[in-house]
Image: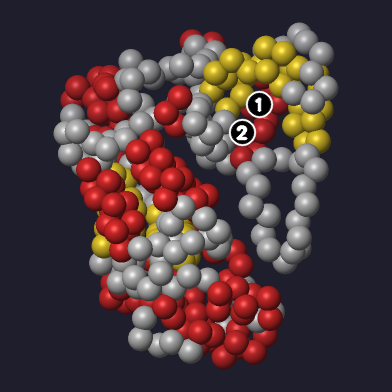
Amino acid sequence: MQLTENDLDFLMESLYKCNQDNPATLEEIREHAITSRKILCRRCKWKKFFITGGAGCGKSYIVNQIAQSVQIYKTIHNTGIETGVKSVDYYKRHMHPDIKKTWLETDVLIIDEILMINAPTFDLLHLIACEIRQCYDELFGGVQVIACDDFFQLPPVTREFVFKSKIWQHYMSEVLVLTQCFRQKEDAQFFSALNETYFGQVSDQTIDYFMTRCFEKDENLNSKYTKLFFRNIEVDCYNNEKMQTIKQEGYWFYAKDVIKNPKIPCPFQIPAAVYLKIGAIVMLVRNFNVDEGLCNGTIGTVILIENNAVWVIMNK
């Protein structure tokens, strides 16, 4: 399936409507993506755009719907580059034939969480793509690029933000800003407070609101509250400590993962084994159904454990 200009125009217009008083719902965008089966670029190389917005506005949801509607190669992990600084000529000579083939056959490249890519890496990917595809006057050698992230978050681990790349500044001129929040849509005060913090313009009213949630001791906290830590090892220690307080039988669940190419970094955000008890508090780590509130970060409680299933009541 190929994407026509009308399909892209519809998508972009729908996204822009998210900034207006009567925003188009993400469900409408999803339905169009499913029914048209055409969210893939034909030769509309000028349509390269960046989707951004605060947490819960549907950035990842939209790109996932685009990617699921057709056969789109959408992972940045298969570009064939490694950590460290090497020349384009080096990668051209040492790149695996399958990865070169992928670069040649790719029409659309969706890069979610592009914040993790710094400016030099983005420039390097562009030069590699141009060299492999033998096309030097278009972004990524003629590949349509749809990028998605929130630049108000932390910068990449090393070097500059990707938007400081000269290649980015030259080609990525279309920016779509999502402002309609779907994750905290039922708590207007909380969303307003998050928005003020997001833009660094916090009012006295919001400070007072946050102070009502300030506790010095764990015992004063509601058990349903989520506690945040800086490092995963601290998260694991806290979760294990809380799990030990539950007077129920524990069960281990082991993942069966199949990695076709061991050279590709593992994309899974879940451990190889999970230990659970009835009464344990769990959290979704990916979006399942945003409209129903089943999104990344939603909290629930385990109520039943079977051999091949775990039943959870999600908080609303």
Q: How many marks?
A: 2
Q: Is residue 234 above or below residue 208?
A: below
Answer whether labels 1 and 2 touch (C-beta < 8 Å). yes
What residue appears at the point 68 percent right and 76 percent down from the top-left corner? 98
Q: Nearer the viewer, residue 290 or 219?
A: 290
What residue appears at the point 63 percent right and 18 percent down from the top-left corner? 312
What residue appears at the point 60 percent right and 73 percent down from the top-left corner? 102
Q: Which residue is identified by label 1?
A: 239
Residue 57: percent from left, percent from top: 35, 39
Q: Nearer the viewer, residue 189 or 219?
A: 189
Q: Secondary structure at mark 1?
A: helix
Q: Secondary structure at mark 2?
A: helix
For disc 2, the neighbor class at 10 Å (few under 14, some 14 to 19, many from 20) is some
Disc assigned to residue 181: none
Residue 297: percent from left, percent from top: 50, 31
Disc assigned to residue 235: 2
Query: Label 1 is placed on what type of residue?
Result: Asn
Q: Is residue 253 above or below residue 125?
A: above
